[in-house]
Image (cartoon, rainbow, N blue to C red):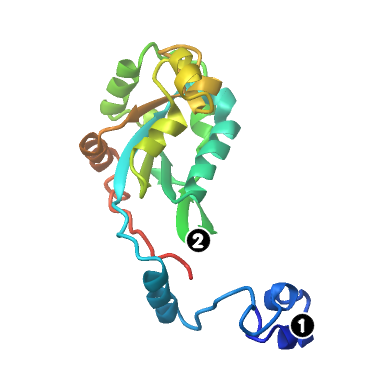
Amino acid sequence: MGPMDPAKAKAVAGPKPLLRGMYGTTPVRNAFYGSETKLCALRDRLLLFPTASPVLQQALAIVKPTALNYVDALSVRFEVCVLNKLFLINTYSGKAFSSWIAHKSYVQLICLSLHFYALHASQAIESDEELLLMAESNDPAYDSELKLAMTTGTSVLELLLGSADPVEAQVYFPTSIRAEMGVSLAHNVVFPLHSVPAAHKYMQKWFPAFFALEVLPEVS
């Protein structure tokens, strides 16, 4: 941001001009209010923007093997949600593939496994129930669930995925994954668990190592 006085900010040499030098006019109208330390930032934020602490909810979505053709598109859609403070974890046979993204808060994204889809693209899944039974059988081939923990409630997941019937999703959730990529009730890309208790149950069973998500404080 630069010094509080925009004139001094303009005088500072560097690879890029300082923000107050670009947008400030006087020490009072200097475009930005900055907190010198993390503690000050936390105090000032609570003073200026008093909000209740977000309630962490968790839900579970299983990406179907028949969604091979949409792996890249799904990655983008889920990543956008991750940037909107959605925490996403994906595993293949219990092995995590991880990378990090920082966007206002530290967010962990464990990437989709292309290997899983390549192995099972030819296998037809007739219904959500059949897929769930396969997952419950502890067959590692179907261990490709997505664990999502959100601070804005499970409605975000519903908006992202859409209705179970892709035709209905096109009407009520036209920008959802199922509206854009779903074909039928059996081939509707993902199997979600909207109930928080149900999501907890399956996450504890399939992801004991990842069940406890630590929500890190926002970056000032």
Tell me if 172 is positioned left or right of 210 in this view.
right
Front-lying residue, 176 or 191: 176
Q: Can residue 55 be spotted in the picture? A: yes
Front-lying residue, 203 or 195: 195
- The structure residue drawn at horizontal position 73% and vertical position 78%, both measured from the top left corner, is 21
Residue 201 position, x and y percent, is 21, 37
Q: Amino acid at mark 1?
A: Lys
Q: In terms of secondary structure, where does tag 1 sit?
A: helix
Residue 142 position, x and y percent, is 38, 28
How many numbered markers are drawn? Answer: 2
Q: Earlier in the sequence, mark 1 or mark 2?
A: 1
Q: Amino acid at mark 2?
A: Lys
Look at the picture and state if 71 lies above or below 219. Answer: above
Other-residue count near label 2 (Cα within 10 Å), few / some / many at <14 / 14–19 / ≥20: few
Tell me if 15 is positioned left or right of 100 in this view.
right
- The structure residue drawn at horizontal position 50% and vertical position 27%, both measured from the top left corner, is 177
- The structure residue drawn at horizontal position 44% and vertical position 51%, both measured from the top left corner, is 85
Look at the picture and state if 94 lies above or below 54. Answer: above
Residue 147 position, x and y percent, is 36, 41
Q: Which residue is mark 1?
A: 10
Q: CA distance from mark 1 to mark 2?
A: 27 Å
Q: Which residue is mark 2?
A: 104
Classify the position of the N terminus by image quarter.
bottom right
Tell me if 173 is positioned left or right of 7 in this view.
left
Q: Can residue 119 be spotted in the picture? A: no
Q: In terms of secondary structure, where does tag 2 sit?
A: loop
Mark 1 or mark 2, whichever is nearer to me: 1
Residue 200 position, x and y percent, is 24, 41
Q: State which quadrant residue 186 falls in.
A: top left
Look at the picture and state if 55 lies above or below 5. Answer: above
Other-residue count near label 1 (Cα within 10 Å), few / some / many at <14 / 14–19 / ≥20: some
